[in-house]
Image (spheres, rainbow, N blue to C red):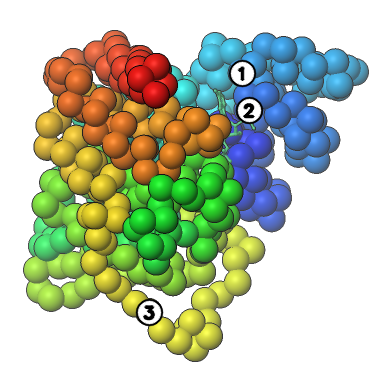
């Protein structure tokens, strides 16, 4: 019986994970569920799944939930300390890291340092810290399993035990696929005026708002290129990004002998999550089997840098190294948040990230503080750029 903590249980990945756990009561038991402010949704999850503990990061929300759970045996904690407590607990062996953004870093790293099995959805934490994260996985003998569909696909196409190790012997390229998001065919001139609703309306995947916007700008693919480099110890030049509008081939590995191994399936996150939850076994996920006759056609085209400038920004950050990736990630998080609040245009996202990268000094990632300082500086600079622009209008 695996004891599971889900960080970000009320989100899209959290819900998909709970769906699979509900199918396998003989395999998984819920130790803890966490969220930030969604206390009503958490109350519903508590009634249905009966975890031992719940963490609401937001203090007010934890008080409200505590009140609603009065008389129940479920314990309610709050804050970052609460998040850390429910991942390092001795009883826990599996942690699903599905908080969105840099706020997921501290509890995810705590799970790594406690040597747990970590199902990594929160790519931002790995992108920010890179070698620091992977070294901690090795040092603490944690088991890192990628949940991001592309990385889970690559993981399935590489020999066993490839995460955090040197690139597989005989590897030619990793081929990362991406659908191109909702604006892959939109007139470039119209991108200035697209709305958050349009950006969040992904043609193939149903995801949280931040990653939906990242998919529309393709910063998601940029972050995923960096994620792949750290996970599989390869360089940016070893990762090709290919547009694949059907989202059926989730990524591929090309070998020196000419073989290309692809992982396919319907676009549904329950497949990679089930794969990682039960690994190395295979369990039912509730996903319909793929019907290739129905799909009938698979297209692959080049990702266009003029349409998707975020891809170049991510490549530049990887080559700059050090804290550049934390800067890229933080600037992107703030820009996406401002776009979702309608304070900046869609096309401002890449523009502002580029300006923040120009204005920040890259230093080596020596410890967690160097990353957190770079993250804070990038956020400050982006807000300042937006304020300056508002003043000059
Ligand atoms: P959602 O926005 O749907 O969910 C985010 C979760 O994180 C919620 O449970 C939310 O709680 C919690 N959360 C948000 N802010 C905080 C905070 N400050 N402190 C503590 N918890 C917080 O996101 P997704 O599920 O879409 O994405 C989660 C992660 O998985 C991201 O890193 C994303 O890149 C990655 N991922 C997602 C995929 C998908 O299909 N959705 C695919 C591949 C990767 P609350 O409800 O209270 O706000
Ligand atoms: Mg992905």
Residue 210 visible in this rendered orientation of the protein: yes
Q: Residue at x 52, y 57 (%)?
A: 202
The reply, left or right, for residue 343 in relation to residue 253 is right
Q: Residue at x 70, y 50 (%)?
A: 22
How far across and how far down the image is residue 226, in percent?
25, 42
The 10 Å Cα crowd at callout 3, few under 14, some 14 to 19, many 20 or more, is: few
Of marks 2 and 3, the one in the foreground: 3
Above or below, comparing residue 74 to residue 126 in the picture: above
Residue 138 visible in this rendered orientation of the protein: no
Image quarter where the C terminus lies is top left
The reply, left or right, for residue 77 in relation to residue 333 is right
Q: In this figure, which residue is indicated by the disc labeled 1?
A: 57
Q: Give yes or no for contact between labels 1 and 2 (Cβ–Cβ under 8 Å).
A: yes
Of marks 1 and 3, the one in the foreground: 3
The 10 Å Cα crowd at callout 2, few under 14, some 14 to 19, many 20 or more, is: many
Image quarter where the N terminus lies is top right
Q: In this figure, which residue is indicated by the disc labeled 3?
A: 298
Element on which disc 2 rests: strand
Precedes in sequence: disc 2 or disc 3: 2
Element on which disc 1 rests: loop
* Distance Cα–Cα, label 1 vs label 2: 6 Å
Precedes in sequence: disc 1 or disc 2: 2
Tell me, for residue 35, which label it has, or none: 2
Precedes in sequence: disc 1 or disc 3: 1
How far across and how far down the image is residue 130, in percent?
25, 31
How far across and how far down the image is residue 321, in percent?
14, 30
């Amino acid at each position: 019986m695996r004891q599971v903590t889900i960080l970000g249980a009320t989100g899209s990945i959290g819900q998909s994970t709970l769906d699979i756990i509900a199918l396998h009561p003989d395999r998984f038991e819920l130790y803890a569920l966490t969220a930030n402010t969604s206390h009503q949704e958490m109350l519903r999850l508590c009634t249905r799944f009966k975890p031992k503990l719940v963490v609401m990061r937001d203090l007010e929300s934890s008080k409200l939930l505590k009140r609603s759970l009065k008389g129940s045996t479920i314990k309610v904690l709050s804050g970052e300390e609460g998040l850390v407590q429910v991942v390092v607990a001795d009883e826990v062996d599996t942690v699903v890291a599905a908080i969105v953004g840099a706020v997921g870093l501290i509890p995810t790293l705590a799970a790594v340092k406690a040597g747990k099995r970590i199902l990594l959805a929160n790519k931002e934490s790995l992108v920010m810290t890179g070698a620091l994260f992977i070294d901690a996985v090795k040092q603490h003998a944690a088991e890192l399993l990628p949940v991001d569909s592309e990385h889970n696909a690559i993981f399935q196409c590489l020999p066993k035990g490839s995460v955090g190790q040197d690139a597989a012997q005989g590897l030619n390229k990793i081929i990362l696929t991406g659908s191109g998001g909702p604006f892959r065919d939109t007139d470039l001139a119209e991108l200035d005026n697209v709305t958050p609703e349009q950006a969040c309306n992904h043609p193939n995947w149903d995801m949280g708002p931040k990653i939906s916007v990242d998919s529309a700008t393709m910063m998601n693919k940029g972050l995923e290129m960096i994620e792949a480099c750290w996970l599989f110890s390869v360089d940016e030049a070893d990762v090709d990004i290919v547009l694949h509008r059907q989202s059926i081939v989730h990524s591929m590995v090309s070998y020196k002998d000419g073989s290309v191994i692809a992982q396919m399936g319907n676009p549904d996150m329950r497949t990679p999550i089930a794969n990682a939850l039960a690994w190395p076994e295979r369990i039912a996920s509730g996903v319909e089997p793929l019907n290739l006759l129905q799909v009938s056609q698979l297209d692959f085209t080049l990702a266009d840098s003029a349409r998707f400038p975020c891809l170049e920004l991510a490549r530049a950050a990887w080559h700059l190294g050090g804290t550049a990736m934390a800067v890229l990630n933080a600037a992107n998080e703030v820009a996406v948040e401002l776009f979702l609040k309608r304070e900046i245009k869609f096309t401002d996202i890449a523009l502002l990230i580029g300006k923040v990268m120009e204005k920040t000094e890259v230093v080596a990632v020596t410890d967690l503080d160097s990353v957190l300082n770079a993250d804070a500086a990038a956020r400050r600079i982006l807000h300042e750029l937006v304020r300056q622009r508002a003043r000059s209008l």
